[in-house]
Amino acid sequence: MQMKAPRSFVKAVGAQRCAPCVAARATQVSKITRKDVPLELEEGDMPMNTFSPKKSFTAKVRSVERIVGPKATGETMNIVIDTEGDIPFWEGQSYGIIPPGTKVNSRGKEVPLGVRLYSIASSRYGDSFDGKTTTLCVRRATYWDPEMGKDDPSKKGICSNFLCDAEVGQEIQMTGPTGKVLLLPEDPNAVIICVATGTGIAPFRSFWMRCFYENVPAWKFTGLFWLFMGVANSDAKLYDNEISEIAATYPDNFRVDYALSREMEKKGGGKMYIQDKMEEYGEEIFDLLNSGAHIYFCGLKGMMPGINDTLEKVAGAQGITYADWSKTLKHENRFHVEVY
């Protein structure tokens, strides 16, 4: 049976500082007013692979907005896409994007570029709450390539740069939706612990839009949403204005802890990474998970070894065999991992 976190455990948090690139806001954080949504999207089975590379969906870009500050370690965009509701999805799923262009395969044949998967960063109702749009959170990928010469030794990721440079009204080819790993629990009283690095925040934004921004009478979130977010510095925080609004409006149901590796130090010294922040609350995390909570991980796959080491350390201190414990969580579908 799913258990709600006791009130004494929940940590009310104040407003988080927004990225400098966002327009100046009033000191007082606004409270959320839930939006009505077309409830027919609550009906039917979960969509899965409605469109494929051979039969893709054509959508149009509605907006592209940079959502990090000037001192962020990279450039991340919030990209809203018009779909007219014709490629529906559920929270936690992903879309495929087919960038324009071709490549020569191993047989010397020119073929279209392959599909790149992106976690969806909005609820099924989209940022306009009408079910007609979807949102992607995309970091512009660049790679160091000395062979390109001294003047421009960077190599750009094809699809991420295509999306980040997209113009309003530009057509894009989509596939999907796909994915079952990161779906929200059916129980609206669930405790969900979400661990993200960088754009791994995307599926968790889809969660919090459903949990806190929308009026869905048949699914009203009454549990605890605990977010761990790891980025380099304050300018690299993503959707910080929404996180602040949720914290101000629902302090008993929402908690956030940041790990800013270039601004914070862990206990004992050294950079603060997301596993170090989790270790600070290790016993609380295990207590919640032993009481029925779900834990989600999304981001670069390099985050998982450190996180697993930390969880194993905490488990050992409690006399728990981590391998057996985590296996039980996975068997109960409460340990969700999607990394790339």
Image (spheres, rainbow, N blue to C red):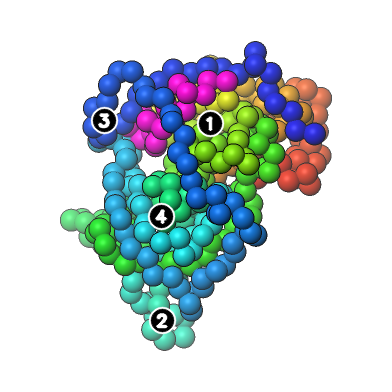
Per the image, label 2 sits on a secondary structure element best described as strand
Q: Does 52 sit above or below residue 235? A: below
Identify the residue under disc 4. Answer: 133
In this rendering, which labeled residue sits more in front, label 3 or label 2? 3
Q: Residue at x 59, y 51 (%)?
A: 42
Per the image, label 3 sits on a secondary structure element best described as loop
Identify the residue under disc 2. Answer: 111
**270 or 158, which is in the foreground?**
158
Label 1 Cα crowd, 10 Å radius (few <14 / some 14-19 / many 20+)? many
Identify the residue under disc 3. Answer: 20
Identity of the amino acid at label 1? Phe
Q: What whole-number distance in Å separates the C-alpha atoms at marks 3 and 2?
A: 42 Å
Where residue 59 sits, quadrant-wise, is: bottom left
Q: What whole-number distance in Å separates the C-alpha atoms at marks 1 and 3?
A: 21 Å
Majority SS type along the magenta span: helix
| Residue 47 in sight here | yes
The region drawn magenta spans: 234-252
- Dot 1 or dot 3: first in sequence order is 3
Q: Residue at x 29, y 51 (%)?
A: 64
Find out whether residue 259 is within the magenta segment.
Answer: no
